[in-house]
Amino acid sequence: MIVVTGATGNIGRPLTRALAEAGQEVTAVSRRAAEVPDGVRHFTADLTQPASLVPALEGAKALFLLLSGDLHAPDARPADLIELAAANGVRRVVLLSSQGVSTRPHGPSRIAMRALEDSLRASGLDWAVVRPGGFASNAFAWAESVRTRGTVAAPFGDVGVPVVDPADIAEVSAACLIGDRHTGGIFELTGPEVITPRQQAEAIAAALGSPIRFHELTRAEAKAGMTRFVPAELADDTLDIISGPLPAELRISPDVERVLGRAPRSFGDWVGRNIAAFR
């Protein structure tokens, strides 16, 4: 049995599906009730209350650990989830971390994630860590404004990073969960090309066949929107990256191809599969 936390999100949903299609027994965990693929168990749990996860761990051999936004807060204790997994018989944990742990190790949210990675390595469990950069699916934040006003609003419109398709994160994570080949690995995941927010808007417009106006936000405006969903420290760390990416954050990582045997999907591929959200 493999347990997937965050199972209804942009990574957890395709990961749950990939594992089920590979013939694995899967338990999907989310904070609220949700539909899951046929044959998949579903449990509701709040990871800020670790005990709520215990029923989902019954019979589990592996856990995909994706932290909710509130587990990035300064007073959070996400390492308790690793201890809980070990105490309940889980033998393998795959952790969704962040590229910033290596590229910007002194950011407040990165220090906390580095500590969680260290806790996992010291746990005695089999482990793997996936460190994606920016997500292609962050573009979903523009869906409503594209549908209703034909507008994309984002900061740093002409500063790009190689955003990664969550489906690639899911497939790499599935490979790490199912077999031993990738145990002890740290995988930095990016897309195949650097792309700016303005270019992303152009890709969405091309797929729609209609023009989109780009409106550049200030950093303060962008932070105000982000802190509706994530702690201020995480918002600042993210804005630091997308405003001035370091050379290491512009590098196209080989790790998707190394694990999956194919090149990473492009932003255009992601748009093509998700264009209905913008219509």
Image (cartoon, rainbow, N blue to C red):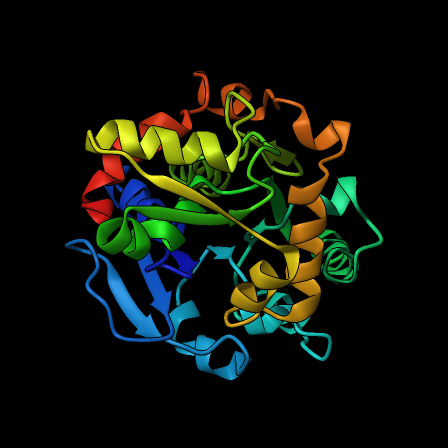
The front one of 59 and 18 is 18
Residue drawn at x 78%, y 62% as measured from the top left: 108
The front one of 262 and 224 is 224
* Residue 96: percent from left, percent from top: 56, 50
- Can see residue 87? no
Task: Give the quadrant of the C terminus.
Answer: top left
Q: State how many labels appear.
A: 0
Task: Give the quadrant of the N terminus.
Answer: bottom left
In the displayed structure, does residue 41 sit left or right of residue 88? left
Residue drawn at x 23%, y 58% as measured from the top left: 40
- Can see residue 19? yes
- Image position of 127 with respect to 75: above or below: above
The front one of 19 and 86 is 19
In the picture as drawn, the residue positioned furthest to the right comes out as 106
* Residue 129: percent from left, percent from top: 62, 44
In the displayed structure, does residue 187 sit left or right of residue 75? left
In the displayed structure, does residue 190 sit left or right of residue 152? right
* Residue 102: percent from left, percent from top: 77, 41
Residue 199 sits in quarter: top left
Residue 6 sits in quarter: bottom left
The front one of 167 and 222 is 222
* Residue 71: percent from left, percent from top: 60, 71
- Image position of 249 with respect to 100: above or below: above
Residue drawn at x 55%, y 30% as measured from the top left: 190
Residue drawn at x 25%, y 74% as measured from the top left: 33
